[in-house]
Amino acid sequence: MFNNLTDKLESAFKNIKGEGRINELNIANTLKDIRRALIDADVNYKIAKEFTDKVKEKAVGEKVLNAISPGQLMVKIVKDELASLMGGTQAAFSISGKPAIILIAGLQGSGKTTLSGKLAYFLKNKKGKNPLLVAADVYRPAAINQLHVLGEQVGVDVYSESDNKDVVLIAQNAIAEAKKLNKNVVIIDTAGRLAIDEEMMTEVAHIKEAVNPSEILFVVDSMTGQDAVNTAKAFNDRLDFTGVVLTKLDGDTRGGAALSIKYTVEKPIKFVSNGEKMEMLDEFYPERMAQRILGMGDITSLVEKAQENYDEEQAKKLEKKIRRNQFDFQDFLEQLQQIKKMGNLKDIMGMIPGMGKAIKDVDIKDDAFKGIEAIIKSMTPFERANPDIITQSRRQRLARGSGKDISEINALMKQFDQMRQMMKNMNKMPIPKMPGFKR
């Protein structure tokens, strides 16, 4: 995510490393490089110029605190300005009304239909809502079929009318159906075109007028950069949408859309999406995104993702087993599956401070654990619970059962033994007593 921009900003900060104080002389080259980095990321020149002017105004004359270098201070100033450029604080997402109505708009190919499915998953599983998906793209049968497939995938009902081309009537009928079924959110997936045209704009405007949505989300393909910002402006002039969703952040994203859209249309980014999985939709936090762009990671989001997939009862049992040196392959398999639920592995690792740069050229596939899982699943339940009994002959059988080379079986066994030894050593360490903490 934004790897090129991150690299260029890091390079820009090198100009003032080692300096004792920020001044107009040593900041000039840094600001020039920052401005160039933003323009290369497809940020409008006017926005890039205004951004660096604000950074300069804050930086020049700032006293460097004890043990803080000018480079560190500049990073903080740029981080704060990046967050401000993207909205400053998280924007509220309104789910009001009985039912609440959410209208999804955007160009064809921006990911509207997939976003509708992801939003339904998000509202159902993270907000406790009971949504209904509505297929209002009557021009592409594939879009209707896709929405039904996604609805089945996330366990959400889909409303469509195959013989009706009146999208306003479809939307109104869907809302009536939602009330009958006690659905408290209606998500309407509208039609898009390859380019902006009057027919599409009029149609979406008529739906808006008829259903009075609490949220109108404009879906932006973040890989299209400044073109996406221009499209957003045209949609906003006509629809006055309430928020933006950036999709395809896992692709070759330069960052122009994320950095420019709030400034241009004065509407907040509310969600970001990366990957095809239905759970890959996150609420947008400007400061966290600014940290990630600057290679600082995003520990807060990482912890939140872990908590979403955290089974407290299972964690307590696991802790007891580790304390008793009883951690086995079944526990290991369950932990791998927990990690996979958190989302794209490379994206997850990129949230760890310092890891983004280290893994930027490393191809980490979502099925990275597939081989390990195949080996463990080739074990009998008794072998999983008792790793020490896995002799060489058993390893040969595991190699045949999993389709792996014997060297891979031996490597996994060695790594597992090292992991258990590390856990054993940790158990010997005294645990400090905390005030008010009971054991």
Image: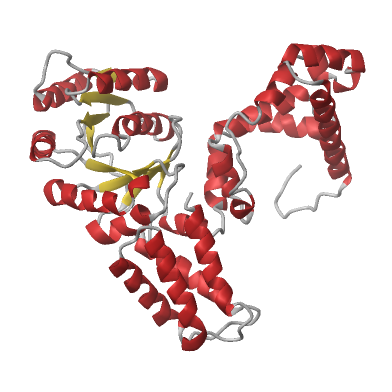
Tell me residue 414's x, y (percent): 86, 31
The residue nearer to you, when weighing 403 against 413, is 403
The vertical placement of 182 against 221, above or below, is above
> Which quadrant of the view contains residue 399?
top right
Quick one: quadrant of the C terminus? top right
Left or right: residue 213 compared with residue 75? left
Residue 326 seen in the current view: no
Say which residue appears at 20% left-offset and 34% top-offset.
192
Tell me residue 304's x, y (percent): 53, 44
Tell me residue 213's x, y (percent): 18, 38
Left or right: residue 2 compared with residue 182? right
The residue nearer to you, when weighing 261 against 12, is 12
Left or right: residue 162 compared with residue 14? left
Say which residue appears at 82% left-offset and 30% top-offset.
411
Residue 191 seen in the current view: yes
Say which residue appears at 88% left-offset and 18% top-offset.
390
Left or right: residue 125 compared with residue 267? right
